[in-house]
Image: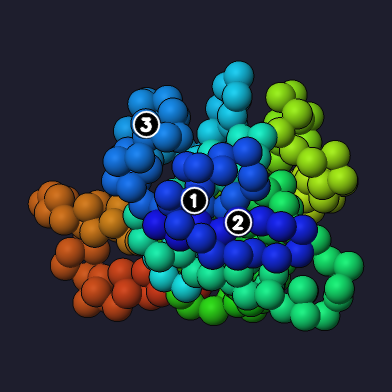
Amino acid sequence: MEIYKINKNILQETSFKEFEQNKEDHYWIIAEPSEVDQHNDTFRFHKSTIDECKSGKQHTRLEVYDDLSFGVINIIDHTGTWFEAREINFYLTSNYLVFVSKDKNRLIEQIKTDIVQNVKESSNYSVNESKILYMLLDRLTSMDNVILKKIESSIAILEEQVISGVEKDFTVEIIKLRKQLLYLKRYYEPLIDIAEDLEENERGLIDEAAIRYFKMLINRIQRLNNNVIHLRDYVTQVREAYQAQVDIKLNKTMKLFTVITTIFLPLTLIVGWYGMNFSHMPELRSIYGYPSVIGLSLAVVAVCLVYFRRHD
């Protein structure tokens, strides 16, 4: 467990014993679920929320209680598989913020680095629980515009290949893009809800000066969500274009089979006709019967080809 005492622009690492003795001061705590459960006589968090921290399989949301807010955030791993998210939980009270994570989280380490860097750059820089929470939510989406641009580029390349008639099955790529965008949509919508609930500040746990940061965060996530919706429409258009190309190729194939069938239909009639072998069929004994049938068949084929070429 890491405990930092917050004093304006200073994060001073301290002990849990000091936290117990001076709970009226402001703190930022980073802990594992087992550590929160172990010290819950001091924290007095709701047992159900601790169980949720332990499970690590909760959906993103914010729960507001009388004296605290409990949040669940799923962090997408853009560098690995998209469909596995790492969970981080937080408790926000009037004077301390607790981040709960099973594993060491790179976002938390980045927040520490940012605070140290900002303190070096500006003597007027100040930090509190609300600002640290905002920094976490801000870090979640700070680079997502780059991710969406990459997805847009992938869709554009796919569209170009489809229109140019590249012989390839694009179904798997289209489905993959649609799943990624659907996953992002389901990721952003709960984040918007969390940011809006925090911005409403129903229990007065958010510092008034930090409210504007959460308003900015809401606007950014809404823009990202709108971009995802537009990209989903774009993928749908590409899928329809690909389906149209497939239909055109299928129509050409069916047209070829139709022409072949139409040509051989009268030839089949001729074969059936002269295959009856009635005794009073003069063509059977004529020396010109065989070449006449060949000529008739060739004439039928020629007429059919000329007709279909003119009506193509």
- What residue is pinned by disc 3? 41
**Kind of residue sitting beneath label 3:** Asp
Image: 57 above or below 15: above
| Image mark for residue 18 | 1
Front: mark 3 or 1: 1
- What residue is pinned by disc 2? 5
Q: Which sits in the foreground, 127 or 270? A: 127
**Kind of residue sitting beneath label 2:** Lys
- Determine the secondary structure under disc 1: helix
| Image mark for residue 298 | none
Image quadrant containing the C terminus: bottom right
Q: Please give left or right for residue 243 compared with residue 259 in the image.
A: right
Q: Please give left or right for residue 249 compared with residue 292 in the image.
A: right
- Determine the secondary structure under disc 2: strand
Instruction: Measuring from the top left, give residue 104's x and y in whole percent.
Output: 40, 65
Circles 2 and 1, Cβ within 8 Å, touching? The answer is yes
- Tell me the residue at 37%/26% (across/down): 48
The answer for how far apart the CA atoms under marks 3 and 1 are is 15 Å
Q: Which sits in the foreground, 71 or 172? A: 71
Instruction: Measuring from the top left, give residue 188's x and y in whole percent.
Output: 63, 46
